[in-house]
């Protein structure tokens, strides 16, 4: 089904959606060739399984190659980007379970204590990769019982085999409080952010010291983090029914094309296609096929 969701003349297609039968889960199924994901983070988890081709996923520790039979597991707030690893691109299914959903599964099925996460980023696990694809199939068929069951089986299996408890927070490094204040100021002034020099002056530090502290705390420089935060805010507005042009201005982008460019490189589909799927999801909230 290479025509659903957002498609273009290059043969790329994508569908990013929610299935009402499984709350706390976003789904993305796509074929990408030239498309690349900008460096970004997610509030929840990422579980991806490639069906054909190769996806290069750039993590803080280096680049991994996701091939058929592997499962990629990315914890919340871990910066990453992605691109095609071969000329023909890649076809894959991705699940985005919320932190709350994963925590509830961990509490019921594992002995992990504290905040559950994954100790590895990629594993060879064809059976679980198949489950990821089957969650999508069940959701697209409107089979809530199967979609929810398969999702929980897949997450529980991955947690038991590759899960860990996140270590207790260590004492904050010297620049962490400054980075936190900078993040708060950028959130408050998302539509009219200060320059790096202005931000550093306000926090009584130097621009390069602020850059180092911010990246050490959040894995991204301030300007990249701000773009990511704007796209997250735009998603919430689109979820509530706001039009893309209005959402663009509300979060600080110059106009809708500005939002389109960054949104597509982070979410994987244009904001118009994203909003259309959200609207269709809400109309089929009884669990009928989306």
Image: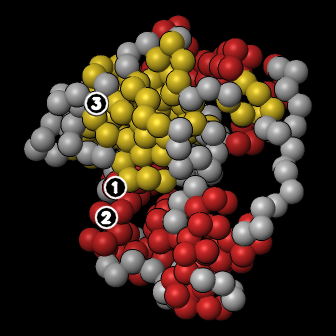
57 vs 92, nearest the viewer: 57
Q: Which label sits in the foreground, 3 or 2?
A: 3
Q: Mark 2 points at which residue?
A: 260
Q: Left or right of 138: which side holds 13? A: left
Q: Mark 3 points at which residue?
A: 85
Q: Are marks 1 and 3 in contact (CB under 8 Å)?
A: no
40 vs 238, nearest the viewer: 40
- Residue 91: x and y in percent read 31, 27
- Residue 19: x and y in percent read 53, 38
Q: Left or right of 27: which side holds 286? A: right
Instruction: Give the number of marks.
Output: 3
How packed mark 2 is, by other alpha carbons closer than 10 Å (few <14, some 14-19, many 20 or more), is some
Q: Which label sits in the foreground, 1 or 3?
A: 3
Q: In which quadrant is the C terminus drawn?
A: top left
In space, the residues marked 1 and 3 are separated at their CA atoms by 19 Å
Give the numbered dot on residue 210.
Answer: none
């Amino acid at each position: 089904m290479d025509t659903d969701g957002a498609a273009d003349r290059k043969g790329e297609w994508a569908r990013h959606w929610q299935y009402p039968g499984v709350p706390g889960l976003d789904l993305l199924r796509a074929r990408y060739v030239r498309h690349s994901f900008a460096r970004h983070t997610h509030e929840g988890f990422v579980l991806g399984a490639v069906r054909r081709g190769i996806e290069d996923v750039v993590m803080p520790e280096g680049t991994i190659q996701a091939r058929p039979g592997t499962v990629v597991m990315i914890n919340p707030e871990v910066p990453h980007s992605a691109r095609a690893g071969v000329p023909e691109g890649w076809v894959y299914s991705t699940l985005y379970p919320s932190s709350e959903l994963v925590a509830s599964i961990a509490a019921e099925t594992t002995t992990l204590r504290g905040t559950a996460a994954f100790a590895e980023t990629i594993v060879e696990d064809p059976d679980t990769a198949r489950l990821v694809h089957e969650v999508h199939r069940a959701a697209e068929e409107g089979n809530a019982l199967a979609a929810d069951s398969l999702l929980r089986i897949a997450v529980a299996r991955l947690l038991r085999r590759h899960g860990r408890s996140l270590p207790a927070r260590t004492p904050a490094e010297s620049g962490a409080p400054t980075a936190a204040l900078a993040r708060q100021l950028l959130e408050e002034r998302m539509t009219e952010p200060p320059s790096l020099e202005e931000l550093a002056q306000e926090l009584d530090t130097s621009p390069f010291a602020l850059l180092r502290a911010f990246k050490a705390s959040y894995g991204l420089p301030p300007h990249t983090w701000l773009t990511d935060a704007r796209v997250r805010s735009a998603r919430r507005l689109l979820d509530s029914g706001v039009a893309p042009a209005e959402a663009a201005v509300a979060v600080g982008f110059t106009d809708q094309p500005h939002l389109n460019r960054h949104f597509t490189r982070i979410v994987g589909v244009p904001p118009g296609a994203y909003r259309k799927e959200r609207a269709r999801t809400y109309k089929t909230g009884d669990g009928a096929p989306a």
